[in-house]
């Protein structure tokens, strides 16, 4: 019979409950602060529901009434430098952190400090989508951010903010401040891959991150018991070696005590912690009706939870200890309501027998597209260079060696840079050698990651938004962006605009096109077309080592997220770079004329530049080839493109990848909108087939475009302009 040994988790898992002695010993100032914060938050939330009921809130109003104990209990006592983020139901956490910042140590018997009213006003204005809000109305109820106060953003994607909080925690660790990050999410998010990936990553890297689970029993109407086998959700922590606590979230003191124990773990360098607080939202997922109105909860269940109200629990304890009278508590409650009535009145005006938002408070519609990206002023005055005009000495380098060269140079000169990705710290510089020698030369700044693109991409986004460091992320293959799509597109790409253009996101994402390598449909994507349709991202693609150095330098200095596209076909090619200058930039938004000509304009990028050059020479066509270099919509060099089109009156867009995800779709449409009167024929396009390249060598080659397909496309364009040419058969 087999030997059997019972195993136990590597980290403690604790149920923490308060006793009468804990309440008797609790600091009166702590209890007063908890009570006042929760009462202000409750009055605020009641006003939100009142506004929602009158149709004054456009979009959802996810009330946290009933859950204030978890937020205030964990946030009261944090340092100003600690960070918090939350989920779509995050008003209470945002307000608790902001209140602790503007008015720490609230006293229920005293007048409210002056900064509280403008905080509540700006918060309610944001939820109503108004200009005075923290995000100028762009974020609304689900995207609340006030970076100055350490409230780094609530999030509409379930679990979506957790990797970003890990980035804040990593920034704290790198800076050695002793500060921590807290990420709040609900029971529904516990089963989200990004959350579990981040738990693993935070544990592996000992990040000072508190995973705070608000277990309110329901994901909309689905119970926890329906969604998972063990409803004790803090059990996820020990599975990753993370110390975990389970507490009654209707007991703010229990939450506070558990948080203090978790903070001691995190601030001492022992890594992350988990707290599960059992709480209850008194109302439905959204709006002013209770869950029983929708049939998934009983009135008896709701009444039982209301009897455990966190505000009343603290009030009763303070009254019993003669720290507060019933009259003083009632007075404080009325003052909270009166303050919110005053705040609400500032936002609305009467209209017939109802109220409406004051028209003067709506954002100017001209603001709609402002702040999607920065203005690139950070690159002003930078030393720039172009290969065809460079007068200094040059040296021959392989393309991949130029990547390593410029990364080493930037790490040497900019201590803010960190880089992460799978195997980048091993294999002599990752799978292609691009990060060769970095880990040895710059220990503590090069991070080989688990296979969890969602977690480490989001973590890098959090680092970038923190502002103290500038992350570089490597995706081994661009297709992996789909694994991390929420973090790449919903979080990183949208952050600046979504939060009212008040946060930079300086992040570089490196990846490679690998068509022709036999890696098949899930490793062969050209990502340009997908990223070009996502607001917020800048995109660059170099075709020469010289251009790569300049574009990478510009990308690393840019305050926007930048996708840097490489190509496996270029890695071993030779080219020149300056012998003693790796500090120049090639400005974002500047194309290069790779070959002048008068008959056709060819627009292309990356390795296709060389295939187009070859095709033109073989056909003898006097075509002008423009290496776009910057591919995002905001950075297209229309001056160079337009000058060429108005000279040749014919254009062919050439790219290698699938026509179904083609970058040329966007480009061709924009050209025809801008230059229709100058074109002698519609924009012609060369791209791969509809299907992604597959494993079979012959089918893979048939799927993507190469020199032969470019030649065929040029022949069609020349025929359409009345100058047919013959393409010799291979």
Image (tube, rainbow, N blue to C red):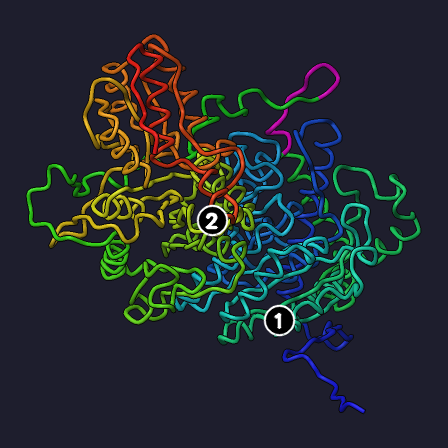
Q: Please check the rendered image and state whether residue 349 is part of the magenta-colored stretch, yes or no.
A: yes
| 164 with respect to 649 (left or right) | right
- Mark toward the start of the polypeptide (2 vs 1): 2
Please tell me which residue is depicted at 59% across the width and 46% down the height of the picture: 155
Q: Which residue is mark 1?
A: 240
Image position, residue 475 (x, y; %): 44, 53
Label 2: which secondary element: helix
Q: Which residues are magenta?
A: 344-354
Q: Nearer the viewer, residue 723 or 689?
A: 723
| 689 with respect to 617 (left or right) | right
Classify 224 as above or below 245.
above
Tell me, yes or no, if residue 114 can be seen here. no
Q: Which residue is mark 2?
A: 147
Q: Quadrant of residue 429?
A: bottom left
Classify 721 as above or below 575.
above
Please tell me which residue is depicted at 56% across the width and 43% down the height of the picture: 144
Please tell me which residue is depicted at 59% across the width and 29% down the height of the picture: 346
Image position, residue 646 (x, y; %): 26, 14
Q: Nearer the viewer, residue 232 or 196?
A: 196
Total numbered labels placed on residues in the image: 2
């Amino acid at each position: 019979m087999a030997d059997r040994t019972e195993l136990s988790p590597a980290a403690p898992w604790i149920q923490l409950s308060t006793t009468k002695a804990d309440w008797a010993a609790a600091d009166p100032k702590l209890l007063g602060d908890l009570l006042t914060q929760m009462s202000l938050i409750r009055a605020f939330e009641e006003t939100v529901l009142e506004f929602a009921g009158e149709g004054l809130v456009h979009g959802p109003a996810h009330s946290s009434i009933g859950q204030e104990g978890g937020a205030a209990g964990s946030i009261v006592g944090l340092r100003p430098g600690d960070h918090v983020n939350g989920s779509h139901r995050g008003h209470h956490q945002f307000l608790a952190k902001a209140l602790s910042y503007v008015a720490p140590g609230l006293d229920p018997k005293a007048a409210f400090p002056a900064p509280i009213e403008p905080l509540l006003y700006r918060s309610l204005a944001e939820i109503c989508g108004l200009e005075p809000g923290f995000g100028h109305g762009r974020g609304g109820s689900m995207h609340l951010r006030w970076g100055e106060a350490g409230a780094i953003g609530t999030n509409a994607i379930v679990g979506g903010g957790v990797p970003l909080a890990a980035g804040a925690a990593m920034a704290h660790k790198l800076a050695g401040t002793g500060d921590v990050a807290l990420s709040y999410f609900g029971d529904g998010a516990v089963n989200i891959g990004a959350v579990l990936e981040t738990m693993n990553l935070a544990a592996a890297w000992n990040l000072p991150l508190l995973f705070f689970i608000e277990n309110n029993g329901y994901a909309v109407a689905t119970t926890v018991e329906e969604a998972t086998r063990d409803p004790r959700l803090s059990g996820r922590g020990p599975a990753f070696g993370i110390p975990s606590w389970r507490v009654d979230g209707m007991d703010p003191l229990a939450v506070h005590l558990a948080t203090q124990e978790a903070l001691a773990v995190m601030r001492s360098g022992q890594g992350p912690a988990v707290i599960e607080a059992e709480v209850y939202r008194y109302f439905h997922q959204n709006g002013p009706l209770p869950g029983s109105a929708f049939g998934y909860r009983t009135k008896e269940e709701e009444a039982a939870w209301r009897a455990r109200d966190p505000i009343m629990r603290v009030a009763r304890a303070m009254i019993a200890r003669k720290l507060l009278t019933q009259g003083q508590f009632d007075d404080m409650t009325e003052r909270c309501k009166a303050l919110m009535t005053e705040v609400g009145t500032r936002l609305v005006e009467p209209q017939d027998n109802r109220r409406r938002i004051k028209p003067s408070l709506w954002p100017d519609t001209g603001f709609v597209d402002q702040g999607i990206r920065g203005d690139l002023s950070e690159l002003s005055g930078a030393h720039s260079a172009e290969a065809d005009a460079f007068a200094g000495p040059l040296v021959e380098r392989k393309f991949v060696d130029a990547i390593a060269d410029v990364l080493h140079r930037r790490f040497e000169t900019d201590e803010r840079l960190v880089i992460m990705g799978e195997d980048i710290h091993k294999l002599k510089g990752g799978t292609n050698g691009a990060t060769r020698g970095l880990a040895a030369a710059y220990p503590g700044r090069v991070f080989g990651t688990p296979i969890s693109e969602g977690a480490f991409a989001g973590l890098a986004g959090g680092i970038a938004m923190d502002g103290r460091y500038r992350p570089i992320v490597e995706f081994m293959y661009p297709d992996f962006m789909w694994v991390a799509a929420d973090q790449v597109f919903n979080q990183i790409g949208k952050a600046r605009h979504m939060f009212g253009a008040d946060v930079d996101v300086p992040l570089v994402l490196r990846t490679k096109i690998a068509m022709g390598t036999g890696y098949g449909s899930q490793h062969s994507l050209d990502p340009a077309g997908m990223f070009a349709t996502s607001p917020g991202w800048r995109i660059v693609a170099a075709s020469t080592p010289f251009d790569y150095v300049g574009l990478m330098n510009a990308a690393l200095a840019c305050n926007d997220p930048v996708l840097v596209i490489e190509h496996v076909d270029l890695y071993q090619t030779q080219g020149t770079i300056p012998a003693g200058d790796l500090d120049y930039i090639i400005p974002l938004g500047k194309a290069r004329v790779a070959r002048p000509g008068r008959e056709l304009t060819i627009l292309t990028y990356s390795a296709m530049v060389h295939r187009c050059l070859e095709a033109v020479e073989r056909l003898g066509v006097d075509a002008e080839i423009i290496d776009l270099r910057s591919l995002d919509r905001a950075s297209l060099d229309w001056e160079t493109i337009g000058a060429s089109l108005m000279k040749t009156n014919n254009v062919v867009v050439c790219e290698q990848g699938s026509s179904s995800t083609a970058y040329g779709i966007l480009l061709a449409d924009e050209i025809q909108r801008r230059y229709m009167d100058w074109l002698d024929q519609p924009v012609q396009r060369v791209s791969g087939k509809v299907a992604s390249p597959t494993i079979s060598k012959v089918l893979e080659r048939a799927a993507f475009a190469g020199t032969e397909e470019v030649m065929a496309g040029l022949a069609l364009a020349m025929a359409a302009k009345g100058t047919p040419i013959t393409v010799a058969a291979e």
